[in-house]
Image: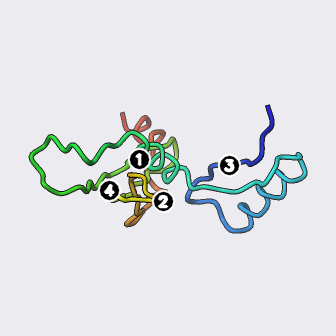
Amino acid sequence: ISVTETVITVTSSATIAQRKSIVEAARIAGLPRPSLMHETSAAALQRSLDLDLSNRTNGSTSNASTVLFYNMGSRHVEACVVKYQDATYMGKSTVSMDVLGCGVNEQLGGHHVDLLL
């Protein structure tokens, strides 16, 4: 198997310096064409592969869908709102994805909830 590109997911709390260090470490490790992707954006991208907005069954006439992605990690909570729409690219039907916004609460996470329980 020939790998031509490497995509590494990072948390939203990763600083610019940390992100640069991750890319540099990937290069040192010999990983080809390393790039970073926010982990919640990666989940949203995966979700876009499963969507078929052309056959809406919820009674909506719109070929758009807005989805909330909620990620409770052990040390933080993150929420992102993503809008999906039908699109055409090079003559093929596809789904466009627009991340409308993300928010992070570093003071709340699964570990904090465990401690409260």
Mark 2 burial class by Cα count in 10 Å: few <14, some 14-19, many 20+ = few
Residue 81 visible in image:
no
How far, Cα to Cα, is label 2 from label 4? 14 Å
Residue 50's place in the image compared with 89, above or below, is above
How far, Cα to Cα, is label 4 from label 1? 10 Å
Disc 2 and disc 1 in contact, CB within 8 angstroms: no
Disc 2 element: loop
Q: Which residue is mark 1?
A: 48
Q: Amino acid at mark 2?
A: Met
How far, Cα to Cα, is label 3 from label 1? 19 Å
Q: Amino acid at mark 4?
A: Asp
Q: Earlier in the sequence, mark 2 or mark 3?
A: 3
Q: Amino acid at mark 1?
A: Ser
Q: Which residue is mark 2?
A: 90
Residue 84's place in the image compared with 16, above or below, is above
Residue 23 coordinates in the image, percent (x, y): 78, 57
Mark 3 burial class by Cα count in 10 Å: few <14, some 14-19, many 20+ = some
Disc 4 and disc 1 in contact, CB within 8 angstroms: no
Q: Which residue is mark 4?
A: 86
How far, Cα to Cα, is label 2 from label 3? 28 Å
Disc 3 and disc 1 in contact, CB within 8 angstroms: no
Task: Residue at the far front: name it.
Answer: 91
The front one of 73 and 9 is: 9
Q: Residue at x 19, y 44 (%)?
A: 56
Q: Which residue is mark 3?
A: 8
Q: Amino acid at mark 3?
A: Ile
Residue 22: quadrant of the picture: bottom right
Q: Residue at x 73, y 47 (%)?
A: 6
Residue 11 coordinates in the image, percent (x, y): 58, 53
